């Protein structure tokens, strides 16, 4: 750890800092909320959709480093919010946030960050920080903002070191909704906003909320489903009384093994009843754990909107081998070496070969590690919603 004497002096005008658990201090110009937040530092390579990223519950307890240098230049609005629950605690950007230049903007990104209690830090060499994460892994850190530039660095280092980190942490219980909810929102169209879901639609999908993005539910509606959302700790009885045609397992934050303590027994029971299921991200990992596989903490994770994934499962026919460009956000993964005979690997990452999809043999249950709803990201994978909803009934 760097000693106080060896640390670089605080630059003139610095109103914020990122303090890593090894004692490294990175200075910058802060914006957004005043105060400090602790979390894991990760990076996201997406060029668009920063507001969706910052409101994705999968980023709970994380500080997002954006590799694209100009973040905040299109402002913020009320439509590009993925969830109102806990999500990213802060972000790190290269350039100062400029005045917004977009016809959909309703406020500056800086004021939006302040209203939502999130801390931003600009003027950082985000390429160097990203390389550090790639080489050494995602560090624990504290991001801090004081307009007067007064910081107790030793106390911030101690706080970063004392934080337990994401491994072993069940964050889904913190970000899930508390009550069952009939989903009402439809798909978004420019100039029209969000439509309304039809309550007469069939089939009926019960979605388990481990920290879901709203756009997932909208895509289920677009594919023709009626959606009811239940909390992460919903019991088998509470799910079955809703008479679902299929069950959706949502994305979410934290360690899948920790969330699996209460989620896996329910999913196992649903598999025993031959319930059709579709899991995304954390939901994909929950399905894998329920089928006997294991999950692992990744060195740096996958976060961005340009991740190539290849279909490798035998069930894709002529499209086996096809490559999709996908949106990803995960720091844990299903260990492909632990897949039991009851699971088929259906998708793999072309970046590192890690598992990105499974199907349960003999069941109508499958999952993918990436985010087919995008938001932000490409639309290559919407077919998965059609595959799931179209197979119900």
Image: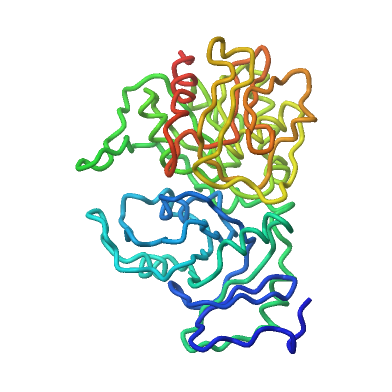
- Number of numbered tags placed on the structure image: 0
- 360 and 16: which one is in front? 16
Q: Position of residue 249 (x, y in %)?
A: 56, 33
Compare residues 204 and 312 and report the one nearer the observer. Answer: 312
Spot occupied by residue 120 in the image (x, y as percentages of width and height): 48, 69
Residue occupying the point 60% across, 21% down? 365
Q: Quadrant of residue 237?
A: top right
Query: Would residue 231 appear left or right of 289 to someone viewing this image?
Result: left
| Looking at the image, residue 207 lies above or below residue 233 | above
Residue positioned 24% across, 41% down in the render = 190
Asked if residue 245 is positioned above or below residue 369 in the image, the reply reads: above
Above or below, 370 relative to 159: above
Q: Residue furthest left?
A: 191
Please tell me which residue is depicted at 20% across the width and 43% down the height of the picture. Answer: 191
Residue 277 on image: x %, y %? 57, 24
State the quadrant of the C terminus: top left
Q: Quadrant of residue 141?
A: bottom right
Give coordinates of residue 185: x percent, y percent. Answer: 33, 38
Q: Is residue 33 above or below residue 84?
A: below
Which is nearer the eye, 7 or 277?
7
Q: Nearer the viewer, residue 237 or 225?
A: 225
State which quarter of the image contains the N terminus.
bottom right
| Image color mode | rainbow
């Amino acid at each position: 750890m760097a000693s106080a004497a060896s640390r670089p002096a605080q630059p003139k005008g610095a109103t914020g800092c990122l303090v890593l658990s090894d004692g490294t201090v990175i200075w910058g110009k802060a914006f957004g909320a005043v105060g400090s937040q602790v979390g894991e530092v990760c990076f996201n390579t997406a060029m668009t959709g920063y507001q969706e990223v910052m409101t994705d519950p999968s980023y709970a307890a994380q500080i997002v480093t954006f590799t694209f240098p100009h973040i905040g230049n299109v402002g913020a609005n009320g439509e590009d919010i993925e969830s109102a629950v806990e999500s990213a605690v802060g972000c790190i950007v290269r350039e100062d946030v400029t005045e917004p230049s977009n016809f959909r903007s309703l406020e500056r990104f800086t004021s939006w960050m302040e209203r939502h209690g999130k801390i931003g830090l600009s003027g950082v060499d985000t390429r160097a920080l990203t390389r550090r994460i790639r080489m050494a892994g995602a560090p624990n850190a504290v991001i801090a903002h004081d307009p007067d530039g007064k910081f107790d660095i030793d106390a911030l280092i101690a706080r970063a070191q004392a934080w337990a980190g994401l491994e072993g942490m069940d964050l889904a219980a913190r970000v899930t909704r508390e009550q069952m909810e009939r989903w009402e929102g439809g798909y978004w169209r420019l100039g029209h906003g969000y439509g309304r879901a039809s309550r007469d639609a069939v089939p009926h999908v019960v979605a388990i909320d481990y920290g879901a993005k709203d756009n997932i539910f909208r895509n289920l509606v677009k594919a023709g489903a009626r959606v009811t959302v239940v909390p992460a700790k919903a019991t088998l009885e509470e799910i079955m009384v809703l008479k679902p045609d299929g069950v959706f397992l949502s994305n979410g934050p934290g360690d899948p093994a920790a969330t699996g303590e209460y989620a896996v027994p329910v999913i196992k029971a649903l598999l025993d009843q031959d319930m059709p299921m579709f899991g995304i991200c954390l939901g994909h990992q929950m399905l894998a754990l329920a089928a006997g596989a294991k999950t692992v903490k990744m060195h740096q994770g996958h976060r961005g909107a340009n991740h190539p994934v290849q279909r490798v499962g035998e069930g894709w026919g002529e499209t086996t081998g096809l490559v999709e460009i996908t949106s990803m956000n995960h720091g844990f993964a299903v260990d492909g070496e632990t897949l039991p005979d009851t699971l088929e690997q259906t998708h793999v990452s072309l970046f590192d070969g890690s598992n990105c999809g499974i199907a349960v043999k003999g069941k109508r249950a499958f999952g993918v590690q990436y985010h087919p709803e995008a938001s932000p990201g490409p639309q290559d994978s919407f077919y998965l919603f059609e595959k799931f909803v179209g197979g119900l009934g």
